[in-house]
């Protein structure tokens, strides 16, 4: 059997990664009439957002709300003990995979319509204008030369070596999507966006969920009052919260996952979700060959126009750190492509809306009350309660 010949490709823009920020950068450049190639390491295009992050979690949420009759249940059981409709993991996975398949096809059509070439393989920098792309066998398959290169490789769950991850008991947010049965109890380490969303999903399914965090409430990025309202609402569907706890060790004992804390207490459950941060996907890129180094936290440093220290190389999305949202990554990608090709653009906005898809969902924009106090701004508070309007009845 003959080996496939090495292919050389020239592009005006080479995009590494096909997640939200890479997609929008590629499409923006293509609409400007530029020749674009996207390099994707995984089998499916779409990045972590489509295949293991944003889209799967939101699809899972909608499936749970629909299959459990969650809102009807909440209405009819307002003054009674809530009963849970039995849902199998197969029911959820059927809905999830149907959405993923359609989204992958749609993204493929968008790339095809805009004449964007997709190359599968792992990209590595040879220099500031050249990428080598290797196949699954670590064979050099493509050499891509580009006027501009955009890094949009996203992030992955942080997996410390001291945490005993497996496929059944100790999971990160990617592994969680592959479980084959619903646990009776779940510990979620980390009360950030990812941890809070998945915690609320499993609580809505009837799992006994405990969220544990070193801070004194979940979602500390929110206005404190809003966070407290959310936490109270989540407690009504069986979710409990342990704050100001720092874990020291995670072990498995008698079929349970046991978390030991620095205050000499411990907590146990059938399954543990470790949701304490994400790290940039840059390990295999050899970015140092292009003259780029990462920050102390492992992210790619950029200026206000998303240029790295090398003017012809841009970076956008999770790989540059916060806010690490699909929506903000999309805008970053568009702005970077426009700047690279000299089209009128603007700086990324200081304020942007944040949507958190817990059950119930939360949205916010602008300063929190705590930030206003720190800035010594004068402000007024107005409250409008959803429970007061007919739509909530």
Image (cartoon, rainbow, N blue to C red):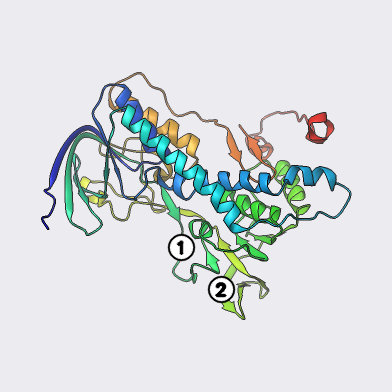
Residue 184 or 345: which is nearer the viewer?
184
**Residue pushed farthest bottom?**
254
- Residue 306 location, x and y as percent? 36, 35
Q: Which mark is residue 97?
A: none
Q: Residues within 10 Å of mark 2 (few under 14, many from 20)?
A: some
Q: Position of residue 219 (x, y in %)?
A: 63, 48
Q: Position of residue 209 (x, y in %)?
A: 68, 60
Q: Is residue 195 left or right of residue 238?
A: left
Quadrant position of residue 224: top right
The residue lying furthest to the right in this view is 79
Say whether residue 94 is left or right of residue 31: right
Residue at horizontal 65%, vertical 46%? Answer: 358
Please tell me which residue is depicted at 26% across the width and 22% down the height of the picture: 33
Image quadrant holding the N terminus, namely: bottom left
Viewer can see residue 50: yes
Q: Which mark is residue 159?
A: 1
> Visible in this render: residue 304?
no
User: x and y percent of residue 269 in the render?
Assistant: 65, 70
In the shown orientation, is residue 255 left or right of residue 227? Answer: left
Q: Residues within 10 Å of mark 1 (few under 14, many from 20)?
A: some
How many marks overall? 2
Secondary structure, mark 2, is: strand
| Left-right relation of 7 to 251 | left
- The residue wearing badge 2 is 249
Of residues 30 and 330, the one drawn nearer to the viewer in this rendering? 30
Q: Tell me where residue 27 sits by quadrant.
A: top left
Above or below 79: residue 25: above
């Amino acid at each position: 059997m003959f080996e496939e010949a090495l292919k050389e490709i020239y592009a005006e823009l080479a995009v590494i990664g096909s997640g939200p920020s890479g997609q929008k950068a590629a499409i923006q450049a293509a609409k400007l009439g530029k020749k674009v190639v996207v390099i994707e390491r995984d089998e499916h295009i779409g990045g972590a957002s489509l295949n293991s992050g944003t889209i799967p979690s939101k699809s899972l949420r909608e499936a749970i709300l629909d299959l459990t009759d969650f809102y009807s249940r909440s209405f009819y059981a307002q003054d009674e003990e809530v009963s849970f409709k039995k849902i199998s993991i197969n029911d959820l996975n059927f809905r999830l995979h149907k959405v993923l398949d359609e989204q992958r096809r749609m993204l493929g059509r968008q790339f095809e319509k805009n004449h964007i070439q997709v190359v599968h393989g792992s990209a590595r920098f040879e220099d500031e204008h050249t990428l080598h792309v290797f196949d699954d066998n670590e064979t050099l398959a493509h050499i891509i030369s580009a006027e501009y290169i955009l890094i949009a490789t996203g992030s992955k769950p942080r997996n410390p070596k001291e945490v005993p991850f497996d496929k059944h008991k100790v999971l990160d947010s990617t592994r969680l999507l592959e479980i084959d049965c619903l646990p009776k109890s779940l510990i979620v380490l980390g009360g950030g966006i990812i941890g809070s969303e998945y915690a609320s999903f499993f609580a809505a399914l009837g799992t006994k969920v405990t969220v544990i965090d070193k801070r004194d409430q979940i979602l500390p990025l929110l206005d404190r009052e809003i966070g407290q309202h959310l936490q109270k609402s989540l407690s009504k569907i069986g979710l409990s919260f342990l704050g100001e706890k720092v874990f020291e060790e995670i072990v498995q004992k008698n079929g349970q996952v046991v978390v030991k804390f620095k205050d000499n207490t411990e907590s146990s459950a059938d399954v543990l979700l470790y949701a304490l941060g994400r790290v940039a996907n840059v390990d295999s890129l050899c970015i140092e060959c292009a003259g780029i180094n990462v920050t102390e936290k492992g992210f790619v440093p950029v200026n206000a126009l998303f240029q790295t220290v090398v003017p012809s190389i841009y970076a956008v999305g999770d790989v540059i750190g916060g806010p690490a949202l699909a929506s903000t990554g999309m805008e970053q990608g568009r702005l970077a492509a426009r700047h690279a090709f000299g089209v009128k653009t603007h700086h990324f906005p200081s304020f942007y809306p944040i949507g958190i898809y817990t059950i119930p969902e939360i949205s916010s924009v602008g300063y929190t009350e705590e930030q206003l106090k720190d800035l010594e701004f004068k402000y007024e508070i107005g409250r409008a309660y959803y429970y007061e309007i007919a739509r909530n009845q």
